[in-house]
Amino acid sequence: MEAETIEIGTVRRAHGVRGWLRVQLHNPESEALRRIRRVLVGSAEGRRVFAVLQAHEVGEGVYLVQLDGVVDRDQAEVLKGQPVLAWRQDLPPLGPDEYYLSDLMGCQAVMPDGQPVGVVRAVVEIAGRSMLEVERAGRPPALIPLAAEFVTAVDLAARRVEIDPPEGLLDLDLGGRPRGPRRRSAGAPRR
C-alpha cells in the first residue's frame, strides 16, 4: 500500500541563481519544512521526490528551500507554482485540536442546528485565504472561509464539519447577498 501524502505548500518562485525555492506553506505556523528530510514536488502526473538540504523561514509560513538536484535558477523555475507534499508519517505529530486540511475532504458540512449543507470536496485558496469548497445537491458549490468564526467544529471521527456562515452566504447562487455593513469607496456617492 502506498504511504499517504499531504500537500503542505506551494512553490511560489525561484530564489537566486543557485536553485533555491521560495515555498509558501498552507499553514503559516507549521514547522514541517524544518523537520522533514524529503518532499514530493509537482502534480500527480509528474511528481518528483527531493531530499530537503536546507530550509530557512523568511516570513510567516514562507521558506527558502534548497532541494537536492535543483542546482540552478532554470531548474527552480520549472517548479514554480507546483504543490509541495510530504508523507504523513514524516510530519510532526498533531495537537489535540489540530488536523490536516486533507482530513476534511469527504466530511459532511452541517449547520449548527445539524441541518446538512453538503460535502467538503476541496480546500481552495482565493486571494490568499483558504476556503472550504462544499458540494451541494443540485446547486453550485458553496465557498466557506476556513476561519474559526465560520468553521466552528471539526469531528473527524464522525466525518463532520460544523459551519456557521454569515446570513446569505449559502444563497449567493440564488442572487442573495451576505448581510452586514456595506463598504463604499471614498468617492462613492452617499444615498
Image: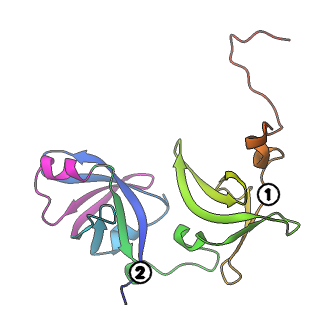
Q: Is residue 173 left or right of residue 127?
A: right
Instruction: Calculate the distance from the C-alpha at mark 2 to the C-alpha at mark 1.
Output: 31 Å
**Image quadrant in which the N terminus is located:** bottom left
Q: Return the residue nearer the eye: 159 or 63.
A: 159
**Image quadrant in which the C terminus is located:** top right
Residue 36: assigned label: none
Residue type pointed to by label 1: Asp
Is 110 rendered above or below residue 143? below
Is 139 rendered above or below residue 55? above
Q: Answer whether residue 31 is magenta in the image.
A: no
Name the secondary structure under disc 1: loop
Q: Residues within 10 Å of mark 2 (few under 14, many from 20)?
A: few
Where does label 2 land, which residue? 4
Q: Answer whether residue 72 is magenta in the image.
A: yes
Where does label 1 land, which residue? 164
Which residue is found at the position 67% from the left and 84% from the top? 157
Q: Are marks 2 and 1 in contact (CB under 8 Å)?
A: no
What is the quadrant of residue 88 in the picture? bottom left
Which residue is found at the position 21% from the left and 50% from the top? 78
Q: Residue farthest to the front?
A: 138
Q: Which residues are magenta?
A: 51-79
Which residue is found at the position 74% from the left and 26% from the top? 183
Q: Position of residue 101 (x, y in %)?
A: 55, 67
Residue type pointed to by label 2: Glu
Q: Position of residue 109 (x, y in %)?
A: 72, 66
Which residue is found at the position 45% from the left and 52% from the top? 60
Q: Position of residue 84 (x, y in %)?
A: 35, 63
What is the quadrant of residue 182 in the picture? top right
